[in-house]
Amino acid sequence: MLRNEIEEKYKWDLSSLYKNQEAFDHDYQQAQSLLEELCTYKDHICDSKESYIYFMNAEETLGNFIENLYVYAKMCTDVEPENEQHQHNFAKANAFMQKSGVDLTFVTLELIAHKEVIERYLEDDDCKDFRYPMEELFRTIPHRLDEEREQMLSQVRELTSIAQDTFQSFRLEYEPVVVDGKEEFLNGATYYVFLKNKDPQVRKDAFEHYFKEYQRYENVFANTLIGHTKGQVFFAKTRNYENALEASLYQDRASSELFHKVLYMANEKYRPFLHDYFALRKSILGLKEQHVYDIYLDLVDDIPQSYTIDESFDILSKALSVLGEDYVKLIQRAKEERWIDFLPSKGKCTGAYSWGSYSSNPYILTNFTENYESLSTLAHELGHSMHSYFSHKHNRPMLANYKIFVAEVASTVNEILLNQYLLNTTTDKKVKANILANLLDQLIGTLYRQPMFAQFEEQLHTWVQERKPISSTTLTDYYLSLNKEYFGPSVIVDELQKYGCYYIPHFYYNFYVYKYSVGMAVALSFVKKIKVGQTKDYLTFLQKGGSEPCIDQLVNAGVDPCSDAVYEDAFTYFQQILEEFKQLMQ
């Protein structure tokens, strides 16, 4: 489908960012002027409390400009990548963001140098908003360098970001899949539709056509992935961290014990439950051989799983009503005010995300295909957007952005509430079994799949850290071995699966993936509270943004993400759902 063939109501309205090109250009000029002014404060930020307050406020304003420019330009290219104006805007916004980072390198070091002075300023109420940001800044002192080397790192970051930029801009064109004698369009969204097709040849063709493209460009993707990883290792070592994992965890005040606890729970202690699931799939489907491209087949036949966009919003309004009237009204606003770009189209990036700036609507990009996954993904991304909305509403910009560590909690709470609503609103055993099957898939995707990805990510960083020679074969062979351990004896892991390590964007997000598992486990704990009417702590958590440490946010809301019990409960819940599903299928 071409973008100009899609009705306007199904495309996002980005006017809360910029109404036209003139508005974009105006902000670009304003941002340039403000950056020049801020640079004049070098060596004078802390001359007085007034100069300190002015600079902090002005830097926050510049951050808003940069965020608006970059987000708008990137979102436009995500849906219309061939539009020359969008590409030009993105190049300008990206270059300006990099320039501001280099030009303002002095800020961090100057604030650190005046730590004692600033701490006196912070005692006054007119500086109270700066207390937590300064606490976080001063915490990084052991990992800061002198001004010359900090400026060098800012410039190097422009180079190391090329790997991720290349990966994000690379658009593959897949050979179409023949379904019932007709060629069908294949991309990242329709791929999973084909994997549900009952014709094994369709599934096999979709799998092969999809991953042969990654095989074709394997050296390109190996170079971008290794290049990105080398950048992360370089920055970690330069900033006196033991490794890139420690550097990532430090940002969240998390420990390596937590990271490895999640991997141990999923990849070792509770993996037998996962193998039981795949064995059950093979038995139910009556497959002599179960390949990786068979694992998305519906386990329950003749159950309609088609949801229009309007039907999806009706379901979500009911499923999420336990979170209160204001929450549900906000869900409807997202649809009515066109926060969402719904439909797949030629050139549009695959997958889904929630994004925006402090001053814009919390937008959503998705590739809606009217199946259960589309409904669940919509619930997930709306969770992110609601979290962003409440965080922005209750905090000024410098305190509004929540960290990735807690980012998956709200999205997963929405998904679990959706599934539980669907389970509770049917008495038909077949329909219920179908819902349980979908819930199992969701739990597997977060509790099990992501820690497997995290293990690959950790090993890759270790190889780079130890300066081991790495080729595409090194990466793909290791990834293939992980998949064989993950799927167990009931699944044939086809050779092309090894190239799956190249299509996962989260490998460029620096140890992001394990946080999905943390988010799921924490979300299940929150859902227990929500279902008995204890919503206040959760809704308060959604308002915290970046105003306090993320682990503290969760602990203060009644869920400790470092507790073994949180993960024991989560994997036990998976086992319970698996047994319930097994009984219904019998």
Image: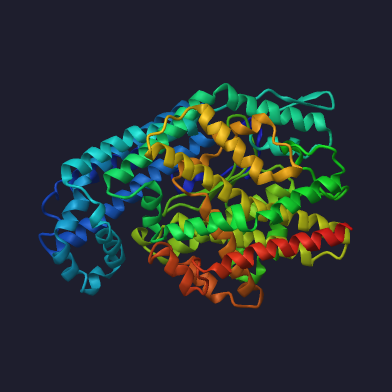
Question: Where residue 196 sits: x, y (%)?
Answer: 77, 40
Q: Is residue 73 above or below residue 126?
A: above
Task: Give the side of residue 575 with respect to residue 504, left or right.
Answer: right
Is residue 138 in view?
A: yes
Pick the front one: 515 or 494:
494
Q: Is residue 292 above or below residue 538?
A: above
Q: Is residue 237 above or below residue 312?
A: above
* The C terminus lies in quadrant: bottom right
Q: Residue at x 80, y 24 (%)?
A: 182
Question: Where residue 43 sits: x, y (%)?
Answer: 11, 51
Pick the front one: 494 or 217:
494
Is residue 335 in view?
A: no
Q: Residue at x 75, y 48 (%)?
A: 278
* The N terminus lies in quadrant: top right
Task: Give the side of residue 203 with respect to residue 565, left or right.
Answer: right
Q: Residue at x 14, y 50 (%)?
A: 41
Question: Where residue 312 sits: x, y (%)?
Answer: 71, 54
In terms of image quadrants, where is residue 226? top left
Question: Where residue 348 sits: x, y (%)?
Answer: 58, 34
